[in-house]
Image (spheres, rainbow, N blue to C red):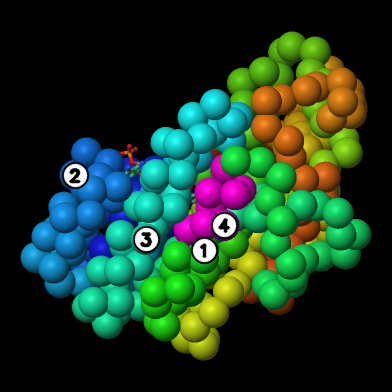
Amino acid sequence: MKALVVGASGMLGQDLCPVLEDFGYETIETGSKILDITKKDDVFDFVENKNPDIIFHLAAYTNVDKAEIEKEKAKLINKEGTKNLALISKKLDIPIVYISTDYVFDGEKNSPYLPNDKTNPVNVYGKTKLMGEIEIQKHCEKFYIARTSWLYGIHGKNFVDTMLNLKDKPLKVVNDQWGTPTWCADLSYALVEILNKPYGIYHLSGGGKPTTWYNFAETIFEYANINANLSPCTTDEYPRPAKRPKYSVMDNNKLLRNWKTALREYLKLIEIE
Ligand SMILES: NC(=O)c1ccc[n+]([C@@H]2O[C@H](COP(=O)([O-])OP(=O)(O)OC[C@H]3O[C@@H](n4cnc5c(N)ncnc54)[C@H](OP(=O)(O)O)[C@@H]3O)[C@@H](O)[C@H]2O)c1
C-alpha cells in the first residue's frame, strides 16, 4: 500500500510517517516545497503520477493568531488546498484522511463534543479548517475526518517544550480554557486504527479527564520534577488576537489513552522524567 502523506514535514507528519512504515505502508512524503496544495494542476499531476492508495492530508495553515490577519492565506491553504486534494482523491477513487481540529466548535457546550455535534468556529483558523471539512464531505465518499486537539510531539514547537524551556521564569497560564492534550505518536496510531472503521468523522484527542492549560502545565512540571513558579490566570488577563473556545473537550470514544499516561511517556522519551 502506498500512502501519500501531505504535510509530512510538519510536527504530526514526522511522527506519522514512521508509524505508517511500521504498518507496512510505503510513504510518499511532501511538504509545501515539494507540493503546494493550493496549486490545483500541480496537485493533480503529482498525485496522478505517484498513484497512491490513500492520502493522509495533514497540511494546513496552523498559526491560529496570525490567521486573524492573514485570513485569505489561511483560507487558500485550508479550504482551497483541501478542495484540490479532495477532488484528486475522488478522481482516483481513493480514501482521504483529513486532520481537523477541536476549534471547529464554539466551546459553549459543557460536556464532551461528539462527532456530529453542531460546529460553530470562533476564529479564522477554525472557520477555514471547517471549510476544509465541508470540501472533503462535498466531494468525497471515502473520507475520514479526524479532529484532534492541543497537539505536542518531538518534531515541532509545542506547549510542553515551551513550558520546559521557560521553567526558570515566573509563568502565568490560562486556567479557563478546557480541552485535552494529544501526543502526536498516539494520534498516529489512532489514524491507522480508524482505517478499519467506517468512513466518517472521528474525534482523536487524548483521553482522560479534561484539563486546562494551567493544569496541563502543572502536570508537566510535576512529572518532570521541576519546581516551577506557576500561577493561573484568566483568558481576559492574557488576550490573544484569535478567540479560543473555552471548552473544546471531545469525546474520543476510547480511541486514545489517557493524556497523562501519554505525557509521562513523552517526557521519558525526551529524557526529562
Ligand atoms: N498543532 C495543533 O495543536 C493542532 C491541533 C488540532 C489540529 N491540528 C491539525 O493537525 C494537522 C497537523 O498539524 P501540525 O501541528 O503537524 O502542523 P505543522 O507542524 O504546522 O505543519 C504543517 C504542515 O503543512 C504544510 N503546509 C503548509 N502550507 C502548505 C501548502 N500550501 N502546501 C502544502 N503543504 C503545506 C507544511 O509544509 P512545510 O513545513 O514544508 O511548509 C507542514 O508540513 C494540521 O492539519 C492542523 O490543522 C493541529
Q: What element carries label 4?
A: helix
The percent position of residue 229, horizontal first and vertical second, equals 84, 18
Sequence-wise, which precedes: disc 2 or disc 1? 2
Sequence-wise, which precedes: disc 3 or disc 2? 2
Q: What stretch is highlighted in magenta?
A: 125-132
Badge 2: few (under 14), some or many (20 or more) residues near its Cα, within 10 Å? Answer: few
Quadrant for ligand 1?
top left
- Name the kind of residue labelled 4 in the image: Leu
Asked if marks 3 and 2 touch (Cβ < 8 Å), the reply is no
Q: Is mark 3 on a helix, strand or loop?
A: helix
Asked if marks 1 and 4 touch (Cβ < 8 Å), the reply is yes
Task: Report the front residue among 187 and 233.
Answer: 233
The residue drawn where x is 25% and y is 69% is 88
Asked whether residue 177 is drawn in magenta, I would say: no
- Name the kind of residue labelled 1 in the image: Glu
Query: Which picture quadrant has residue 69?
Result: top right
- Mark 2 or 1: in front is 1
Mark pair 3, 2: CA separation: 18 Å
- Name the kind of residue labelled 2 in the image: Ile
